Image (spheres, grey):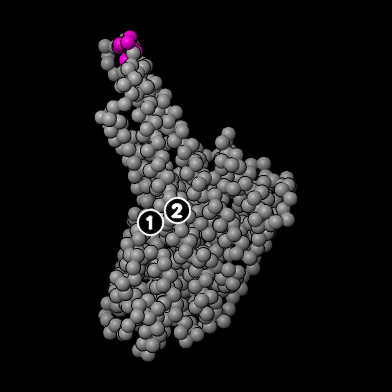
Amino acid sequence: MNFFGYQEKARRNTSVLVALFVLAIALITVAVYGAVVVGVMVGQLFVDQAGFSSNQLWSLELFLWISAGTLLVILGGSAYRIHTLSQGGGTAVAQMLGGNRLPPAAKGALDRRLLNVVEEMAIASGLPVPPVFILEQSGINAFAAGFTPSDTVIGVTRGAVELLSRDELQGVIAHEFSHIFNGDSAMKMRMMGLLYGITLVSDTGIGLMTMKRTSRYSRDRGSHPAIIVIGLLLFIVGTVGLVIADMIKRAVSRQREYLADAAAVQFTRNPEGIANALKVIGGYKQGSTVNHQSAGQASHFFFGNAIRSWYSSDWWATHPPLEDRIRRIDPRFKGRFEKVDSKTRLFANQAQAAVDFMVSSGNQVALSQVNSDAVMAMVGNPGLESLQEARMILKKMPARVRDFAHDPYTARAAVYALLLDSNVKQRKIQLKVLEKTADPNVFRETLDILQDITSLSPELRLPLAEMVMPALKEMSLSQYRIFKKSVGALIKADHQVSLFEFSIYRMVIRRLNGEFGKSAAIEIKYHQMAPLLPHCRVLLTILARTGHGEEGGASFAEAMSMLAEGEHRMLEPIESRFSHFDQALVQLNMAAPALKEMVLKAALHCVVSNGVVFVKEGELLRVIADGLDCPLPPLTMA
């Protein structure tokens, strides 16, 4: 199964989740009705010594009222939770767990190593570089959370940062990136929202048990016995609901962990990395425990079992047993864990991390010959070649430019510098506009870094735009508004929009909109190709002209024939082509995964029909893949 197949499977798993949720609500509603009936029976004992007649056990009117109230509590709570999560995306989950965002320009050697691993993985896989959050927990664990790649974050515990070697840490991060590829992160966000409403039933029970009479004439200020009984029973029902919620988590998530382990091995081609990380967890006193009040409701996000309690046996846990996970990767494992000496490991990792950051080099690259089938196979499934290419890109990036990209203040200057025209006359016009709109200090930083960025090799430009994302996400809302306005003014200053300007604007601003605006999963609108053909025509026309000029008709026709039969001609050149292109990508992103696969394959064929990918084509192809939320690894240059 490829990336698009796993995306479709994630959608089906979400449907299973919804079905289980509906079943849970039905069972809880019946249980709540029973609790209220018992409470009413107790109440009548204090009024009528004759007691409660058995023919009064069922009342349709009472059942409908109770059902309505129960649904209001559960669905209302779930809707509220999903809404709050959509406002913050993965950041909301990380902050709920007590995570602190790791500055992109972190100075500690171990923190820099973590950022480098995440950055390397993101560039190798074609995903946006996610912000990294540190959970100050001694247990070894990590998670990925977010509705879309643009709002996804990576969270890592302090124990994982300090006690795992680079290869082990890389295996864990690759595992989390696999959850992003396969749609698991978005599914887990929805799961958290849906299951939250169930927990409110027990809270309602606690509220009823502790409720006081409000009448000032009553000597007895305690609750009526019937209310206490109903509250107690609702608390019990709610507790059972929590158990049901854990069962749903287990039913949905355990097999996904096996899949993510296998994908991490395939990504890194280093089975010892993730296997040894699991062995370290098994031999470490704290294991993968996360001691936080919200760890329970987020337990399904984590790399390993985050909670230890009476019900967290291997059978009941949201994650498979460590021994089983390790044996699937390393069949030679005997099931014995060596005791971990945390001080020795910390010292060794700090020393190695300090050495790793003392090396940097780089030279330029040019074009590449590309096999389209090989590239499609790498979508959501990057291999060792992609990882090596990402390492090469990071090594070629000048140290000063990397420093600018990792600082929340100067990252804005790096983006401005990327957008400045190579033509001196046009650049002067742009700088005058930028001086009026941008923050004065950021403008000065732009002038400072301008020469370094304009001298970058062309193939390093988009990777730089990806590298600045975590730092840009640390802007305040007011800073973001100024930045967005300045970027727009900078692009419009010369009264024309270049392909690269469009690419940068769409990738950067689209991803930041998820951070500073509402974030939610993209809804599937299209299940047939026919209504998407006009949008495909726009996309493939611009793509064909970018690589082949007016002679691109043949490659365009071949690409369109992959989507539909019939005669296909490129669109006539239009002045507002990029606005049409943007609208086309918005609509195509609402297509089912199988349709996205067809569109991306046609776009790739349009680019590689002559066997060579030029830098401009590669940049536009990355923009298309990004717009479709399909992680496309960087094309190998030669």
Q: Is residue 46 magenta?
A: yes
Q: Report which residue position mark 1 lands on.
A: 521
* Residue occupying image coordinates x 59% and y 75%: 362
> Is residue 397 rendered to the left or right of residue 211?
right
Which secondary structure, mark 2?
helix
x and y percentages locating residue 161 in the rendered image: 60, 52
Which of the 4 quarters of the picture holds residue 200?
top left
Viewer-side label of 2, 1:
2
x and y percentages locating residue 410 in the rendered image: 45, 63
* Residue occupying image coordinates x 34% and y 75%: 536
* Residue occupying image coordinates x 59% and y 59%: 262
Quadrant location, the C terminus: bottom right
Among the two numbered marks 2 and 1 on one chain, the one whose residue lies closer to the N terminus: 2
Please state which of residues 196 and 60 is positioned toward the viewer in this rendering: 60
Q: Is residue 312 above or below residue 439?
A: above
Could you give the CA–CA distance between mark 2 and mark 1, rounded to whole angstroms?
15 Å
Characterize the local packing of mark 2: few (<14), some (14-19) or many (20 or more) Cα atoms within 10 angstroms: some
Which secondary structure, mark 1?
loop
Q: Residue furthest bottom?
A: 551
Please state which of residues 325 and 176 is positioned toward the viewer in this rendering: 325
